[in-house]
Amino acid sequence: MRASQLYSMNGSGILAMLHGGMFSVFAALSLCSLASPTFAQSGHEALHGFHEFCRRHPSECRPAGPSVRQVAATAQHMSELQQINLTVNRSVEEMSDREQWEKEDVWSLPTTGRGDCEDYALMKRKLLIERGWPSSVLLLTAALTPQGDPHLVLTAVTDKGDYVLDSRTDTLRTMSQTGYTYLSRQSRANPRAWVSVTTGRADQGAGGGFPGP
C-alpha cells in the first residue's frame, strides 16, 4: 500500500487495509528536513515550508469541523489515533527532502510514498480530519528531540492529555512522555497561525498571520 492510495482512502478503507494487513513495513526513523540553526533556537525558519505548503494546498490549511478545545479520549478515539499513526508510519518510506526533491524544507503530503517527519504529520492530520476529527484538536507541532535534532509531530488534544503521533514510533505517547522540547504549534483557532507551546501567544516568526488563499 502506497501513500498515494492512503491519500485517496476514506476511514473505512483504512480500517479494511489494517485488518487485511495490506501495507508494506518501512523503518520510520525520522530524517526530518527541519535542520537549521534558526529552527534549533526557535522553530521559526523551518516553518517557511508550511507557508509554501498552504499556498499550494489551501484546503489543507482551513479550519475543519467545530471549534472545540479538546475531544474525549474514548476507546474509539484512541483506537483511531493508534490506527492512523501506525498506518502512516508503516506505509511511507522515510526520505529526506534533499534526497527526494533536491532541496530542503519541502512540506508535502507523501503521495510519492516517501517523505520526512512533517509529511507524515500532514498525512495523519488529513486522515483524521476525514474521519470526522475537528482541526482545532489536531495540531502540527515543532520540537527538538532529546539529542537536539529538529522534529515535527502531530498532537491530538484530548481530555486525558495531548497525544503525540510521531514518525519515530508507533506508540502513542503524551507530550510529557516523549522527552521532546516543544517550540511552536498550530493555533487551535486558525490552522495557518502558529503559537508558542509554552506561552500560547501568537508566534509571528513561526507563521502567524499567513495570507489567505
Image (tube, grey):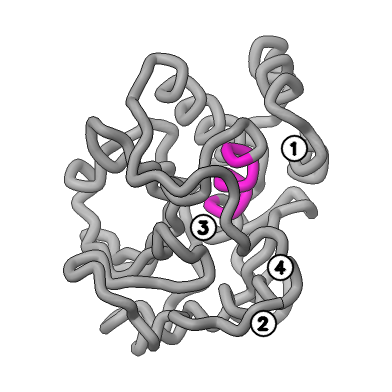
- The answer to if 116 sits in the magenta stretch is no
Q: Which residue position is annotated with label 1?
A: 6
Binning the other alpha carbons within 10 Å of mark 3 as few (below 14), some (14 to 19) or many (20 upward) gives many
Seen from the viewer's position, the closer of residues 195 and 47 is 195
Label 2: element kind? loop
- Residue 168 in sight from this viewpoint: no
Disc 2 or 4, which lies upstream in sequence? 4
Tell me which amino acid carries mark 2: Lys
* Pointer 2 residue: 103
- The local secondary structure at tag 3 comes to helix
Question: Is residue 140 at least partly visible in the picture?
Answer: yes
Q: What are the residue bounds of the magenta stretch?
A: 121-129
Residue 122 within the segment the image draws in magenta = yes
Q: CA distance from mark 3 to mark 4?
A: 20 Å
Q: Residues within 10 Å of mark 1 (few under 14, many from 20)?
A: many
Labels 4 and 1: the sequence-earlier one: 1
**In this rendering, the label closer to the viewer, 2 or 4:** 4
> In the image, 58: left or right of 112?
left
Image quarter for residue 95?
A: bottom right
